[in-house]
Amino acid sequence: MKERVKRLVGKTVFAAGLDALFLRNAAIVVAFHRVQDTERSEGLTIGVRMFERYCRFFQRHFRVVSLHELVEKLERGVTLNRELAITFDDGYLDNYENAAPVLERLSLPATFFLVTRWIGTDIVPWWDEVEGVRHQWMNWDQVRSLHRRGFEIGAHTRTHVDLGSVDNGEAHEEILGARRELEEQLGASVELFAYPYGRQDNLVDSNRDLVRGAGFRCCCSCFGGVVARGTDPFHLTRVPITPRYTSPQQFGLEIALGRSIVLA
Ligand SMILES: [Zn+2]
């Protein structure tokens, strides 16, 4: 019942254009993981039709920009105006097979953050192991294809390590190593970074210095929060899109009301 009410209120708010008032001078970066149709509801998975509904909602109510463009605006300190950047974490194959065609059909930019040592392998991460599911990763040809088609590729470490719990040497290898491997595979510069797990305690300040020192221009978290003028690109918050939101309107309402923060 509560969810239904939220959906209705969200619809009304957005239909009335009140969102423009709530979200004035702000930007949002959203983070997806998997886009596929599954029998069981999983926290990291959004169905293909629901993904398309999100994309159309973004297109209608926000100015969808590439993450690069948003980072550049933050660097220049210009006023933000409802920009929204779409990102994906980890490099699941369904991003290539299901999400990219929808994005292309709607002419929307997006960034894919990849775990370099998992690309083209059959490694099962612990969170999928726990759920008893297996999902495939993209291979390097598919990553290069996304890049050629204009999508942005970013780094998400080499092995999805929790940077808040390893020593500086290992963190350095994971951060700089991922950038080098991506650049070698793409033959292009890679400047966007999102740290694994993305909560406040999964990164310490010294890691942030490593990210900056490795030549990246941003460091994305994933615990929610909107972006404002003056936001440091190395403290760039993202809002994870999960089945916790029953509709894009509910997502929009919670964002507008400043309730996107997911606490650990
Ligand atoms: Zn991740």
Image (cartoon, grey):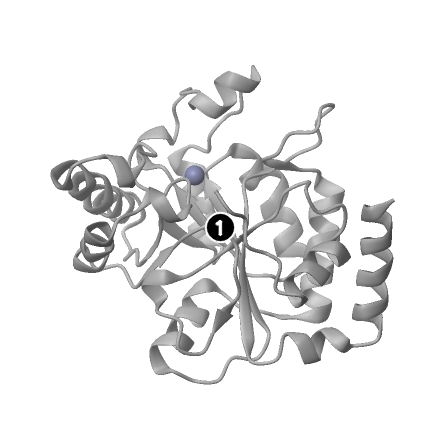
Dot 1 alpha-carbon crowd within 10 angstroms: few under 14, some 14 to 19, many 20 or more: some
> In the rendering, at what x and y percent does residue 208 appear?
25, 55
For the N terminus, the quadrant is top right
Quadrant of res 6: bottom right
> In the rendering, at what x and y percent does residue 64 appear?
59, 67
Is 89 left, or right, of 42 in this rendering?
left
Which residue type carries mark 1? Phe
> In the rendering, at what x and y percent does residue 59 appear?
68, 66
Is residue 74 among the parts visible in the rendering? yes
Is 216 left, or right, of 228 in this rendering?
left
Q: Along the line of sight, which residue is nearer the eye, 248 or 52?
A: 248
Is residue 144 among the parts visible in the rendering? no
- Residue at point 26%, 59% (across, down): 216
Where 141 falls versus 193 (above or below)? Answer: above
Q: Along the line of sight, which residue is nearer the eye, 48 or 249?
A: 249
Is 31 left, or right, of 23 in this rendering?
left
The residue at the far left in this view is 169
